Image (cartoon, rainbow, N blue to C red):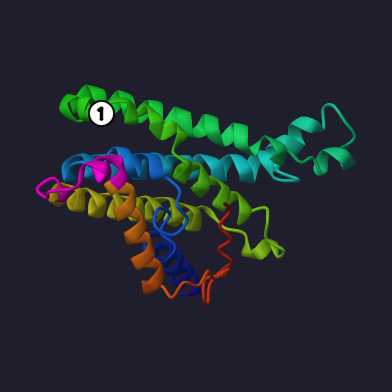
């Protein structure tokens, strides 16, 4: 029961309370660039959610079995080249950024091939922004969050398993989708308004994004909790 409650808290936190875009301000590039129409925003949000889920799954697997100190695969390989005592404590966490970026890039490539084959109009509407999901810092942010809750915990029993990690990836992507769809709906209405020339285009978009973030901060009380109430530590790295 406590495990399901932890999953629930992580999901609500990632999607609403600690929304990646409106609270941590990551993933701003597609949030601004692909929010002109609701259908485009929904498609981009779905693609980001899928990529984030796959990337989180890969990052958890690689971190748990290869990168973390004493990981089984790296320790088994290292014992062929060094004494067993040293091999048991080998630490490859220095490679996390490189490995995570490769995992994200491979996930994006898979999504790009799928969308180009089965949804050509959506692929054309994305333009350059679909390959740029590779550099979407929200996805790397999710991977680093998973890493911090595997390696960065004081009690190994509090380390996240695959279920908690996937909950963060899925609902973190859902929170991104909510934010970008809201922005797209507002921008569609703004197209019907008489906006002064200096504020047209990216300027009014950034202003609206700032207002949304401000309203969101007031809604959640402006506090920045370090832990989920009643659940495991949810350290979010910036």
Residue 86 left/right relative to 235: right
56 shown above or below 221: above
Question: Residue at left 31%, top 44%?
Answer: 203
Give the residues drawn in magenta, as a range.
190-203
Residue 159 image position (x, y, % from top left): 62, 59
- Name the residue at 51% across, 33% down: 103
Q: Is residue 100 above or below residue 124?
A: below
Residue 39 in magenta stretch: no
Residue at 53% x, 77% y: name it.
Answer: 230
Rendered residue at 41%/45% (across/down): 27
Residue 206, image x and y in percent? 34, 48
The percent position of residue 126, horizontal first and vertical second, equals 26, 30
Circle 1: element type: helix
Residue for badge 1: 115
> Which image quadrant is residue 130 in?
top left
Give the crowd class for mark 1: few <14, some 14-19, many >=20 residues within 10 Å. Answer: some
**Residue 121 placed where, x, y %?**
16, 27
When asked about the image quadrant of residue 233, the answer is: bottom right
Tell which residue pokes out farthest to the left in this image.
192
Report whether 27 appears left or right of 83. Answer: left
């Amino acid at each position: 029961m406590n495990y399901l409650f932890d999953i629930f808290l992580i999901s609500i936190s990632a999607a609403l309370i600690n929304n990646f875009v409106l609270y941590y301000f990551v993933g701003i590039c597609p949030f601004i660039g692909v929010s002109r129409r609701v259908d485009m925003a929904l498609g981009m949000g779905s693609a980001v959610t899928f990529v984030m889920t796959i990337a989180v799954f890969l990052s958890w697997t690689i971190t748990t079995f290869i990168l973390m100190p004493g990981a089984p695969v790296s320790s088994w390989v290292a014992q062929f080249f060094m004494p067993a005592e040293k091999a048991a404590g080998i630490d490859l966490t220095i490679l996390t950024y490189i490995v995570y970026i490769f995992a994200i890039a491979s996930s994006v490539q898979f999504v790009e091939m799928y969308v180009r084959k089965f949804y050509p109009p959506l692929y054309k509407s994305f333009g350059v922004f679909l390959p740029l999901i590779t550099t979407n810092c929200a996805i790397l942010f999710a991977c680093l969050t998973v890493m911090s809750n595997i390696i960065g915990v004081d009690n190994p029993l509090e380390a996240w398993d695959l279920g908690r990690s996937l909950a963060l990836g899925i609902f973190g992507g859902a929170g991104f989708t909510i934010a970008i769809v809201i922005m797209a709906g507002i921008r569609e209405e703004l197209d019907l308004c008489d906006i002064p020339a200096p504020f047209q285009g990216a300027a009014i978009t950034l202003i609206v994004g700032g207002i949304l973030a401000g309203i969101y901060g007031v809604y959640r009380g402006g506090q920045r909790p370090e832990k989920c109430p009643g659940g495991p530590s949810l350290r979010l790295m910036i």
